[in-house]
Amino acid sequence: MKIPIGAVCIALAATVLAWSADPALAEPQAQPAAPAVDPWTVTGATDVRYFSWKSDLGYPTRVAGGAGGSGSELYIPFALQTAGRLPNRDFNVELVARGGYVWARQSSGPLSGEVSTVTDTTTSAAVTYLGWQAIQPFASVVTNLPTGRSALYGSAANARMDPDLVDIANFGEGFNIGPSVGVNIAVTGSLLLTVSAGYTWRGPFDRENGLDATDPNIQSPARINPGDVFTVTAGASYKSGMWVATLNGSVSTETATDENGENLYKTGTRYLANAGLTYTWPDTGVTSFSASASHTDRNKVLFTGTPVLIGEIMNTNSNLYRVGLQHLFPVVQDKLYIGPLGSYLFRDHNGYEPTTLQFVPEKERWSTGALLRYGASPNVVWNARVEHVWTREDADPAPGSQRFSVLANAFVPGSAVPVVSSDGWQFVGGVNVRF
Amino acid sequence: MTCKWRSVWLGMLGACLLLPTAAVAQAACPAGVAANGECVDAGLAGSAIENAIILSQPKISYTAYPVLPNGDSNYRYPNQLNPDPQGSNSADNAGRASGRRRR
């Protein structure tokens, strides 16, 4: 495994800085950067995350050829955030840059491969105007810089693993830039309504294969130009006593995605809702609950022999639902918190018949584990997490070793996939340091 | 001076006149003032803005959103619920909709 020296140096530097900071009382949790009147603050953070999994089949399951699978991944993200006020103190500014290093390996018979690379880099610049009563407009520009690897030639392509078992399943894409504007409407000091709109220009990138390829070992380089995305959001945040509640929703529409200069598909309109509820107990810590759901309308797709995209007959996209719950017990008040966490994710089967090529079976993901948070000083917070993950994907039949392609209007060869069960472990350690 | 430019200058002048009033409020309320005159809760406001920015850019990156790593748990799952043709999340269905599928 080759690890870039730069990634290791940044991780070590953050660690050394963390240990050398002055000890004192600590905040139990690093909150999202909030507007502050203090001088500019700079926060550095890094994690070391290790994932290990095994499964009845390698990934992707349709080409695993009956071979059992296993894999592992090391992911080291690092980020720097600075926030403060402009000379006109009504303007709050926040800047974030984040990079990372990832090593991944799958060992699943014909689907074995390894990759070692820096990840894509993301940046964010946001300005909020706080000078008006009740109305707080904000604007931001977010980018994805293509410092990772979008094309994985040879066996490296097999290092793309099930994203329900590892954090990084995609090692790079193109240059993306997304401006957003929005406004916080402060009805009271503890009741906020927020609306925003964002447009994401997504740049082209190369891949070792087309998006419709199934076997990572049969490669044909392709130029992908992903669709741009327009999103509007609305949210509400409310705090009362020990309760904090948030509710957010968004609607996204997308332009067509091209491959080698030709339209390939256009994703349907997507609807997302998520909610969070946090309660701080008088003496026994903090409980947090979250829930998310998403639905995507039918795509427009390219039927064989047709020159333009046409609305698909059934919906390729599944609905997804997820709930999570965690509690942090205070072991040493305001300093050390430990507690359990768990989550459940459900993906329903898509709209196609199980014997068709376009069918996507139902899938469940369970996780349970423990979380630790240690405030070594007012400026240094350590985090650790261990999780065990289980997934179960329903059978994907292929009677007579064939599937019917609705789009090609023909039978194509295929292998039946039985119920696939996987389980994995995730180990995370990290630190936030405010300078 | 055209009517258009006159309107712009008048608008800027109005904004300048309003700013000192706002600045007075700022000194007492770091995160701004609510409609009912209360100081806005700074943590709540910061969190709401971060949520809005990230959720309005759902496909800015399939590696990570631009947040500190310990914030990933707040955003990983909204991200996971996005259909991604590269198969990098739970909704990796879009690639199956192509008529040019090779199998």
Image (cartoon, rainbow, N blue to C red):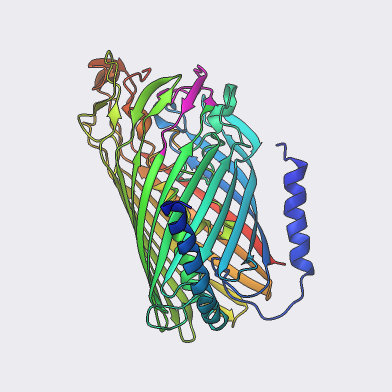
Q: What residue appears at the point 42 percent right and 27 percent down from the top-left corner? A: A66
Q: What residue appears at the point 45 percent right and 48 percent down from the top-left corner? A: B57
Viewer-side residue, A135 vs A65: A135
Quarter of the picture containing the N terminus of chain A is top right
Q: Is residue A218 magenta?
A: yes
From the viewer's perspective, is residue A203 above or below residue B19? above
Residue A346 shows in this picture: yes
Quarter of the picture containing the C terminus of chain A is bottom right
Viewer-side residue, A164 vs A188: A188
Residue A368 shows in this picture: no
Q: What residue appears at the point 33 percent right and 31 percent down from the top-left corner? A: A266
Q: Magenta residues: mostly which secondary structure?
A: loop
| Image coords of residue A363 (percent x, y) | 33, 44
Viewer-side residue, A192 vs A87: A87
Relative to residue A311, is residue A9 drawn left or right?
Answer: right
From the viewer's perspective, is residue A210 above or below residue A201? above
Task: State the residue lying farthest toward the top.
Answer: A305
Q: Quadrant of residue A157?
A: top right
Task: State the residue lying farthest toward the bottom.
Answer: A282
| Image coords of residue B54 (percent x, y) | 47, 54
Q: What residue appears at the point 25 percent right and 16 percent down from the top-left corner? A: A411
Q: Is residue A419 magenta?
A: no
Which range of residues does the magenta coloring cover? A206-228
Viewer-side residue, A223 vs B33: B33
| Image coords of residue A382 (percent x, y) | 65, 66
